[in-house]
Amino acid sequence: MSRSIYLADAKTEDIKAKLDTGVLSINIPKVPSTSNAKKIDIE
């Protein structure tokens, strides 16, 4: 059995997987997103 999922914002260097009593846990950190938000000061 296999399953594939594409994660565009995954940080591939730090992916960790653990198999414990038949349960597979996968930790996939996200790449910090760059926001196009602009801060405007109000006078």
Image (tube, rainbow, N blue to C red):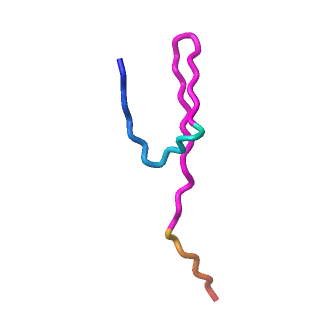
Residue 28 position within the rendered picture, expressed as x and y whole percent measured from the top left: 54, 37
The quadrant the C terminus occupies is bottom right
Q: Residue furthest front?
A: 13
- With respect to residue 26, does 30 lie above or below? below
Determine the residue positioned at 52% across, 16% down. Answer: 23
The quadrant the N terminus occupies is top left
- With respect to residue 1, does 9 lie above or below? below
Determine the residue positioned at 60% across, 38% down. Answer: 14
Determine the residue positioned at 52% across, 65% down. Answer: 35
- With respect to residue 16, does 24 lie above or below? above
Closer to the camera in the image, 37 or 12: 12
Residue 18 position within the rendered picture, expressed as x and y whole percent measured from the top left: 58, 22
**Magenta includes 10?**
no
- With respect to residue 22, does 28 lie above or below? below
Residue 19 position within the rendered picture, expressed as x and y whole percent measured from the top left: 56, 17
- The number of discs equals 0
Q: Residue furthest bottom?
A: 43
Determine the residue positioned at 61% across, 85% down. Answer: 42
Q: Which residues are magenta?
A: 15-35
Closer to the camera in the image, 40 or 16: 16
Name which quarter of the figure residue 27 lies in.
top right
Closer to the camera in the image, 20 or 4: 4
Residue 36 position within the rendered picture, expressed as x and y whole percent measured from the top left: 49, 69
